[in-house]
Image (cartoon, helix red, strand yellow):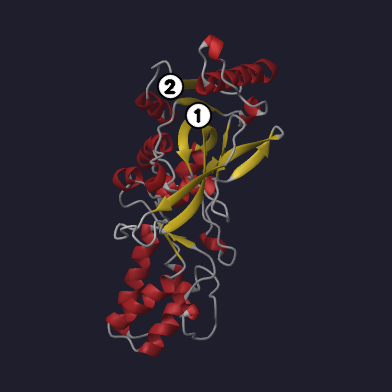
Amino acid sequence: MSRFVQLHILTSYPPSNLNRDDTGRPKTAVIGDCTRLRISSQSLKRAWRTSDIFESELKGHIGTRTKEKGISVYQALIKQGVSEKNAREWAKTIANQFGKLKSDKKTENNEDLHVEQLVHFSPEEEKAIADLVSQLATTDTAPTEDDLKLLRKQHTAVDIAMFGRMLASSPAFNTEAAIQVAHAITVHKAAVEDDYFIAVDDLNTGEEDRGAAHIGELGFGAGVFYLYICINRELLQENLGGDAELTHKALNAFMQAVTKVSPTGKQNSFASRAYAGFVLAEKGDQQPRSLAQAFLRPVKPHPKKGEDTMTRAIKALMDRRNNFNAVYGDCAEASAQFNVETGEGSLSAIADFIVE
């Protein structure tokens, strides 16, 4: 099995606001001395992790991210008849295994039961916690050190295995990410435009006031995005406890998600859902490398040749790949691709390729 799989994906999005900055406008980056639209790695990973594809294909192997595990443990203990004092102390002890608590003392907002950072819990850890809660309620005794050690389960949570988990205050629960996801960027110069809109009051007859009931402004942009992904297949299988079958299922579901699932930002306003138009998949043991260099010079369409932005982007990408191979030798042992522009290749073939 080749160690690395690299994916180079081109997706064309119509007017959209998939991933907003602190002002509500689409995120951007300056590359090649011009502004590009950007979709953050975090936004993409969350969209895939919470997608229907992951839910259906990887059911029972998806984790839950929360700061409030202490709250749910406390409520479960109370429900099973444990006193308020013991329930709070035991819940704090359990939650503290996964991270530092926001407060040492009880507060109005129960901050003593909240962990400071989001914690990604695997299904196995969720079950271990539930079993411990039942044990504590039955015996009415505080958790021991051995009880707490049992919470550190070998897990099969695919999303944790893929994207990792880092708990600064509880390093024993850390997992090294097996999949690295770059920020998606437009291959061309792009501008953030403004959509000026109004809302009309349906009950306003216009006899006294003909003005709009609401006036607003919303940023948006459109473009062809390049996305680079590097998968360490050996580490993914290791993170999944050596389960080869689950690793194959995970890779197949991941390939489906990255080509079909869009971030959810402002989808009701723009319906900017899109499938990937081009995918180049490479695998081998060589040192991975992105092909983002192909787009330092902004891509422009060539109407006289009948080449749109997507076609030109594909050409730039493949030219850069070939140039890397010419200079460094083959940068991958094998490759496969599909191209919606020409109708060549297929998603199923790419999925089989990255699993083999």
Residue 161 appears in the picture as rendered: yes
Q: How many marks?
A: 2
Of 315 and 280, the residue lying toward us: 315
Q: Residue at x 46, y 34 (%)?
A: 13
Percent of width and height locating residue 108: 47, 85
Q: Secondary structure at mark 1?
A: strand
Disc number placed over residue 338 in the picture, else none:
2
Q: Residue at x 36, y 46 (%)?
A: 51
Q: Secondary structure at mark 2?
A: strand
Q: Residue at x 37, y 27 (%)?
A: 347
Q: Quadrant of residue 41?
A: top right
Q: Residue at x 43, y 74 (%)?
A: 70
CB of mark 2 within 8 Å of CB of mark 1? no
Q: Badge 1: how crowded within 10 Å, few (<14), some, or many (20+)?
A: many
Which three-letter amino acid code belongs to the residue tagged 2?
Phe
**Looking at the picture, does residue 110 appear above or below residue 322?**
below
Extreme residue in the front direction: 207
Percent of width and height locating residue 290: 61, 31
Extreme residue in the top direction: 305
Horizontally, residue 256 falls left or right of residue 318, namely left
Residue for badge 1: 10
Q: CA distance from mark 2 to mark 1?
A: 11 Å
